[in-house]
Image: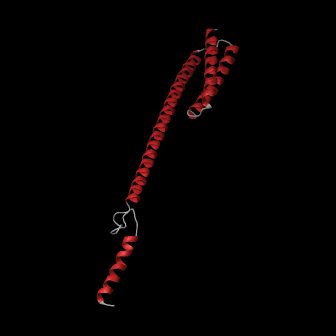
Amino acid sequence: MGVRALLCIIAVSFLLPACAAQTDDPRRGGLFGYNPQGYERRIQDRETRLKASSDAASAEKEEQARLEASVATQEQQRGAIHIKLAQMNAELAKTRRALDETKAKDARSRSSLDDLRRRHADLSDRLNNLESRAGDPAATAESERLNADIRRLAKDAATLGSL
């Protein structure tokens, strides 16, 4: 064999793998190995992943908006509870002033006044306890009972004051 034949064999041995390799990457396709259908498939895969990523981002945004709305609603409810507690506290303070102004004229009045003061102290303790649990859902029912008890105390104090 001659040098020429040897060079041809070497050249063919390098060109043959380049021609045989099929790829969808145009940077690696070689002379004849580029596959346009594979390249289109590669583009389609990338677009699919991009759409999935975009959909996931949209879902996360919607979830964040829902959570923020939930937090805002809870804050609004908490504010309403604090306003109601403040009103009950003001009514309890008004009742306390009425009790302080009431003068017992006889032993029965004194006994009733002492009972009202004990009830007032109990209600005051219950209100303080309720204020510390302002965000607790069970506190709503307790606040209704406490509010009714405060009204009864105010009524009893007014009755005692009219004696």
Dividing the picture into quadrants, the one containing residue 103 is: top right
The mark tally for this picture is: 0
101 relative position to 112: left or right: left
**Where in the figure is residue 33, as x and y percent of width and height?**
37, 67
* Residue 136 appears in view: yes
In this view, the residue farthest toward the left is 4
Looking at the image, residue 21 sits to the left or right of residue 82; the answer is left
Q: Residue at x 52, y 31 (%)?
A: 78
Question: Whole-percent x and y of residue 105?
Answer: 65, 12
Q: Which residue corresponds to the image point at 53% horizontal and 28% vertical from the top-left?
A: 81
Reply above or below: 122 against 15.
Answer: above
Residue closest to the eye, 96 or 91: 91
In the image, residue 124 sits, relative to residue 13, either above or below, namely: above
Which sits in the foreground, 66 or 87?
66
Q: Position of residue 69 (x, y in %)?
A: 47, 34
- Between 41 and 76, the one lying in front of the other is 41
Quarter of the figure with the C terminus = top right
Judge left or right: residue 54 versus residue 100: left
Q: Position of residue 135 (x, y in %)?
A: 56, 34
- Left or right? Give the position of 85 relative to 42: right
Quarter of the picture containing the N terminus is: bottom left
**Residue placed furthest toward the bottom:** 1
The colour scheme applied to this rendered structure is secondary structure
Instruction: Give above or below for 82 relative to 67.
Output: above
Q: Quadrant of residue 109?
A: top right
For the residue pair 120 and 137, the one nearer the viewer reads as 137
Residue 121 visible to an observer of this rendering: no
